[in-house]
Image: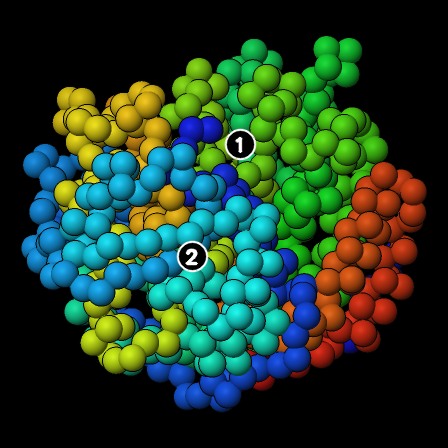
Amino acid sequence: MTQNSLPQVTRRTLLTGIGAAAGSSLLMSCRTESGPGTGPGPRASAAPVEPPTHVPFEGVTPDLPGTVDGVTAGFFTYPSPPVDRPGFPLPETTPITAMFQGESPTMSAGANPVVQQLRQQTGNQLEATTVLSTEYVSKFQTTIAGGDLPDLVQIEQVAELPGLLDKHFTDLTEFLAGDNIAEFPALAAFTADNWAVSTINGRIWGVPQPRPPAGRIMLTRGDTLAKLGIDRDPKLNDGEDFADMLAELTDPTDNTFAIAGDPANWLLRAVRQMCGAPNVWAEENGSFTHEIMAEETVEALEQTAKLVQAGFTHPEAFSKPGENHTWFRAGVTPLLIQGFTAWGNFSRSNPEFDTGHVELPQWTGGGPSKLYTSLAGYYAFIGIRKQDSPERVREILHVLDYIASPFGTTQYLDINYGVDGATYHMDGGEPSYLEEPAGAELLTGWPYAGAGSQNVLYAPGDQELVQRQHDYLSATLPQGRRNASIGRYSATALSKAATWDKRRNDLERSILLGEKPVSAWNTFAEDWNNAVGKKMAEEFAASAAV
C-alpha cells in the first residue's frame, strides 16, 4: 500500500535496567514519534561510512555460535579457566565522569569493592551520576541546556537530536568505522545491527549496549498448561487456533484468564504481527509506510477486539497493566508477552514454571508469522562529550572496551559478577552470586556502556534452555520483520507526534472494549496521515537516502 491509501473498515543486578528490556522493542519507536523538535542538525547531510568491521572474539569458543543476523552465541558452561584479556589494568588517565539511568547506589563508591575493582582495572577514578529512568529525560535535557556535560552521557531520543549530537558530542565515526574498530577488540565483536542503535544519519555517535534484536516473545507457564494437556510450547496453525488456546486457558469461575498486560500495547501488537502489519515502519523502494496506514492493522484491531470482548484478557488488564508479572507468577494468567530476555530470567528465577513460548502463527495460516524484530541493543546509547584531543577520546573508548569484555573472560566476570569472594563465588566452575549484603551492591549505570550480560545465552546447569533459546533465535531472526525507521531521523516524529500517539492509544482501547467501531480507525488514520504521517514518511525517506 502507499502512504496515502487505507482500506475502509529485585534484586539489584549489575545490568541496571534489565526490566526495561522488556519493552525495548517499542521504546525506540515510541521515542522517535514523540516529543518536541525542529529538524536535523549539520551532520544530517554528512556522507555515511561503512559500519565498524565485525570481528568475533576468538578467545572463547561458544558451544552454539552466534550469527550476524543477531542470533546470540550460547554457552553451556563458563570457560575454565576464564580467558584473561591482555592490556589490563589500563594506564592511569584523567578521571572520567558519566551520567546514566539507574537507582541511587546504597553504598558509596569508596566502600563498594566492585567499583574499586573497576577503577583499578581501568586506571581511572570513574565517577557516575545515576538518575531514575522515569526522570532521566528531564535530567538529560536540563544537563544539555546547562552545557556542563560529563564525559559520558546516556543519549535519549529528544528534539533536534542530530544537531544536539553535532554540537555537544564526539562523532566517533573516524575512531570506530571499518577496520579502525580493531583498536578496541571487545567493541569489534559487536555486529552492524548493534551499531545501528547508535548510528544517526550514517554517523556513529556512541557505544550501544548490545542485545539480540529479538523483540517480544509470548511466554507460557508450562506447568499450568500441562495440567490442561497443552504442550509447554504450543504449535498453532492460525488465528483460530490462537483464539481457541486463549479460550482454553480462561476460566473466570476459577479467576484464571489467558493473558494480562495492557491489551492495546501487548496483545494487539502480537495480533498485528500475526496479521502481517508493518513493524511500525516499512520501506519499499525508498518509500516509507507506517503501520497505521496498513490494511493488516485494521484486521488486527477487529480480531483483537473479539478476543478482548470474549473475556480472554484479565478484567483489570487495562486498569492495572503493571500487574501482568504478578498475575503470571501467581498462575492467574498463564501467558505473558515480554522482551526476549524475560524468558531466561523466568527460567532461572522460577524453574518450577517450566517456562515455554508460543510461536505466533500467521493469522490466516501458512506457517509462523514474521517476528517483529527490535533494536539490537538498549535504545539509549552512550555518547562521549566533545573532548580536547583524539587521544582523550581513545582513552575513554578503551575504558568502554573493558566494560564490553566478552563472555568467557576474566573481565566479563569483573563487570557482570563483581569481585570473587565479595559478590560472587565459583560453584562447580560456574559463577554464582553471593547473598546479601556483600552480593547486593554491584555496578549501577556502567553496564549500559557496552556490557554484554544480555547478549549471551547462558544458564548454569540448564543446557536445554540455552539450546531452546538458540534454536528459537535461529528460526525467527533471519526471517524477522524490521522497523525500517531504526537509525533514521524525523523531526516531525519528535515534534508533533506525541499528541497523536495519545489519540491513537485512546482509540485503540475504545475499539478493543467495543466502545467504538473498528471503522472509526479510518477517520483517525487519514487525519493522522495528513497531519504528521506524510511528513514523517518523507523525512525518514530523506534520512535513508543520505
Tag 2: residue type? Answer: Met
Give the vertical position of 485 relative to 125 (above or below): below
Q: Position of residue 102 (x, y in %)?
A: 46, 45
Q: Position of residue 328 (x, y in %)?
A: 59, 24
Q: Residue at x 76, y 36 (%)?
A: 318
Mark 1 nearby-residue class (10 Å; few <14, some 14–19, many ≥20): many
Residue drawn at the location 59% of the way across and 32% of the way down: 336
Q: Is residue 170 left or right of residue 532?
A: left
Q: Nearer the viewer, residue 135 or 243?
A: 135
Residue 165 against residue 315 in the figure, above or below? below
Residue 333 seen by the camera: yes
Q: Nearer the viewer, residue 435 or 49?
A: 435
In the rendered structure, find residue 99 and report the number of the disc placed on it. Answer: 2
The numbered mark at residue 219 is: 1
Residue 45: % across, % down: 49, 89
Report the mark closest to the observer, 1 or 2: 2
- Name the residue rendered at 24%, 73% in the picture: 392
Q: Quadrant of residue 188?
A: bottom left
Gap between marks 1 and 2, in whole Å? 34 Å
Residue 355 in the figure: left or right of residue 185 = right
Residue 382 lies in quadrant: bottom left
Q: Residue at x 78, y 62 (%)?
A: 499
Q: Is 26 above or below relative to 245? A: below
Mark 2 secondary-structure assignment: strand
Question: In this image, 420 relative to 106: left or right?
Answer: left
Q: Amino acid at mark 1?
A: Leu
Pinpoint residue 71: horizontal percent, then vertical percent: 35, 50
Which element carries disc 1, helix, strand or loop? strand
Looking at the figure, which quarter contains the N terminus? bottom right
